Image (cartoon, rainbow, N blue to C red):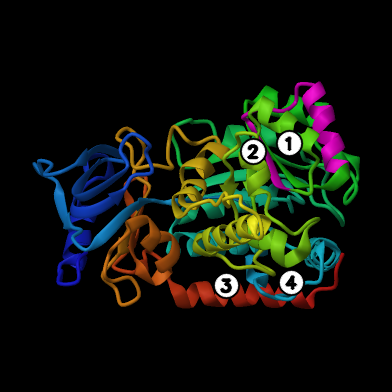
Amino acid sequence: MNANDTTDAAVLDQLRRRPAAERRILFTGATIVTMDPGLGVLHNADLLVEGDTITAVGPRLDAGDAVVVDATGTVLSPGFVDTHRHAWETQLRRIMPDVDDLGAYVMSTLAGYATVYRPQDMYTGTKLAALTALDSGITTLLDFSHNSRTPEHSDAAVEALRDTGIRGVHASMGPHFGDWDKQWPGDLTRLKERYFSSDDQLLTLRLATLATDEIAGPALAYGPELARVAKDLDIGVSVDAVFGTASSEAILRWAGDGLLGPDVTLIHATGLTCEAWKAMGETGTTVALAPTSDAQIGLETAIPAVDEALSVGIRPGLSIDVEVALVSDMFTQMRSLHAIQRMRAVNAAHGTDRQPRRITTHDVLDFATLQGARTNGLDAVTGSLTPGKKADLLVVRAEDLNNMPLNDPIGTVVLGSDARNISAVLVGGEPRKWNGHVLDVDLPALRREVHASREYVLNTPAA
């Protein structure tokens, strides 16, 4: 993996010749950003992967019969965790880069394009989103799949996550507009039995819902009935469109009814009242921020609510949201939040003798990894390079032109790096990107598939 290493292809070949369950990989000589509070940052250290699990982190580990990857000159980091993305839309990415507001997005995409999607379009969009995520270092993706018009639409979305090898969370919701089978939420039982029967797999299931009935009516809004569905299935809940006065009132109702807690994620959480935040903090409810979405689409206050979250003891996860108008990668989310919060902190203290309360690069990397995993209900599985967790990790070249010399590894990952610096991505110990290339992708065939799906969606009248 270092600049002078010419064995990348040979090393990958060695790895793939071994059965996955018996595979041992030893990364040597790296700077390891564990994001484990007890381990911190380790310099010139090794990391051992056995099967799908990290089994040791430290200096001069015994290689034994492991395949050795010389990681000198690199930073090893946990894979990023995306807590909320509408993956089915991806063949329409950047179709409206200067979207005016939420209403423009809703009417063009949810009331328009979404209504003509076929199951194969769901599959193509979701697959493209997951492969793009892997390329940019996102190893866990929560797909807020809110276009489940038929059981076949849901199947296609789940199978796309499965086929890419990402650690995927399928959060299922019925569509906002247009004709659909009304199979949701009842179809969640079938989905769980068919795709999510094991706890030891890459894919997990959640219930997706909206905060209020303002956009799509009461059937899609969170409340006692949907909370009961999630409880009966023993799955988490992700609640989108959480902003403003109506959502604040809903949060207080949910708290009073016992419907909040660590297994519930509130997405965006912009423009909420202090009382709502207090209820969220007291119940341990998780929060998924979407820094570029809030700012660019102009959701409520348009300010990512990181200060509000931290003030009540919530460390949020980060998310991409909609690629029809936004970027695809976690580096931009970290940098945007870092810059916006620090700007606000300095501005608030300007002209006074108060010291600004600024978040750090460590904070935003924590949000993008360990806290994202906790938000998705997966912090026991992923989010840090902790022995016993699954081997979801990135190898970032620190001696590339835009990164050298390595002075601060966390600063290098957050402020210096991008997808081109990610040499390797492992998910559950399986290489998904190697020597800078996503593996097992027929790019010309994928390109034809994506273009054909886009042309169908754009040229079919809305239902």
Relative to residue 251, is residue 30 drawn left or right?
A: left
The disc placed on residue 220 is none
Name the residue that disc number 4 marks: 457
Report if residue 260 lies within the magenta region.
yes
| 3 or 2: tag closer to the N-terminus | 2
Residue 114 visible, this orientation: yes
Which dot, 1 or 4, sits closer to the camera? Answer: 1
**138 to 230, vertically: above or below:** below
Regarding mark 2 in the picture, which secondary structure is present there?
A: helix
Instruction: Kindly check if marks 2 and 4 are in contact, taking CB atoms under 8 A apart as contact.
Output: no
Report if residue 456 lies within the magenta region.
no
Amino acid type, label 3: Glu
Q: Pointer 4: residues within 10 angstroms few (<14), some, or many (20+)?
A: many
Name the residue that disc number 1 marks: 277
| 3 or 1: tag closer to the N-terminus | 1
Image quarter where the N terminus lies is bottom left
Who is closer to the viewer here, 228 or 259? Answer: 259
Q: Pointer 3: residues within 10 angstroms few (<14), some, or many (20+)?
A: some
Query: Which residue is painted at 49% across and 31% down in the image?
Result: 198
**254 to 37, vertically: above or below:** above
| 2 or 1: tag closer to the N-terminus | 1
What is the magenta range?
Answer: 246-269
Name the residue that disc number 2 marks: 311
Query: Which residue is painted at 32% across and 32% down in the image?
Result: 388
Name the residue that disc number 3 marks: 449
Separation of marks 2 and 4 at Cα, in angstroms: 44 Å
Which dot, 2 or 1, sits closer to the camera? Answer: 2
Separation of marks 3 and 1 at Cα, in angstroms: 44 Å
Which dot, 3 or 1, sits closer to the camera? Answer: 1
